[in-house]
Amino acid sequence: MRAAPSLTLDTLIRVPSSAWTLAGFRSWAVSEDFPSRGQISYVQGELLIDMSAEEIESHNKVKSEVSRVVGSIVHDEDLGTYYSDGTLLTNEAAGLSTEPDGAFASWEAFQRGRLRCVPREGRPREHVEIEGAPDWVLEIVSRNSVKKDTELLFQAYHLAGIREYWLIDARSSEISFRILSHHSGGYRSTPTRAGWIASRVFGRPFRIRRERDRLGNWKYTLEARR
């Protein structure tokens, strides 16, 4: 069988032919040849490449606020480990290797073998990847990630057995904030009650709001209550 050709995009990155398999993509993703910028994912046989700059007002600020609040809850209550964006998550059963905008794994997930940290070759305490199913993942929808976040990852995260998927879209006049719970037939949106959405993973409801800051730009606040 003829080998797949390598692919070069705008001279910025060179995708090796081996990256069209999950094993090959994983090797490339932790190598020195992997691009230091952009979003590159492997989802059920597809390579998804987005080299565009991250939008600050509707993406970066939302991600930062969720990471601040959820990361603090995880840390202060010693629930497990919070992983910010840039962490490679792989699940072989789902044919998935991607870097979510955030991920959380409880101590139970590690103890029961649902997730493990993958070390760098020859350096067992330096981890370059998490493999398996964390309890929670976050994706912020951007202009180029609509299909990826709402269809491809929606299916892949469910197939991976991830208990809760937070999907936030702040590009419009109203923020779309969905907490999706894992059920046998797929993810289901948790209903909003008086503006709050309950998280089973964190055992409390959340809501997100925004207002203009002193420069007229967006300031986001993720609120949680017991």
Image (spheres, rainbow, N blue to C red):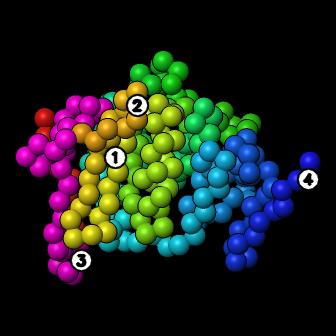
Q: Where's residue 116, x and y in %? A: 56, 29
Real-space CA distance between mark 4 and mark 1, rounded to the nearest whole angstrom:
41 Å
Q: Is the C-beta separation of discs 3 and 2 under 8 Å?
A: no
Real-space CA distance between mark 3 and mark 1, rounded to the nearest whole angstrom:
24 Å
Real-space CA distance between mark 2 and mark 4, rounded to the nearest whole angstrom:
39 Å
Q: Which residue is mark 3?
A: 217
Looking at the rendered structure, the kind of residue marked 2 is Gly
Q: Is residue 220 magenta?
A: no
Q: Secondary structure at mark 2?
A: loop
Range of residues picked out in magenta: 191-218
Q: Which residue is mark 2?
A: 185
Q: In the image, 65: left or right of 151?
A: left
Quadrant for residue 174, please give it: bottom left
For marks 3 and 2 on the same chain, the one whose residue lies earlier in the sequence:
2
For marks 2 and 1 on the same chain, the one whose residue lies earlier in the sequence:
1
Real-space CA distance between mark 3 and mark 2, rounded to the nearest whole angstrom:
40 Å
Q: Secondary structure at mark 4?
A: loop
Q: Which residue is mark 1?
A: 166
Farthest residue, direction right: 1
Front of the two marks 2 and 1? 2
Quadrant for residue 132, please give it: top right
The residue at 36%/29% (across/down) is 183
Q: Is the C-beta separation of discs 3 and 1 under 8 Å?
A: no
Q: Which residue is mark 4?
A: 2
Looking at the rendered structure, the kind of residue marked 4 is Arg
Q: How many marks?
A: 4
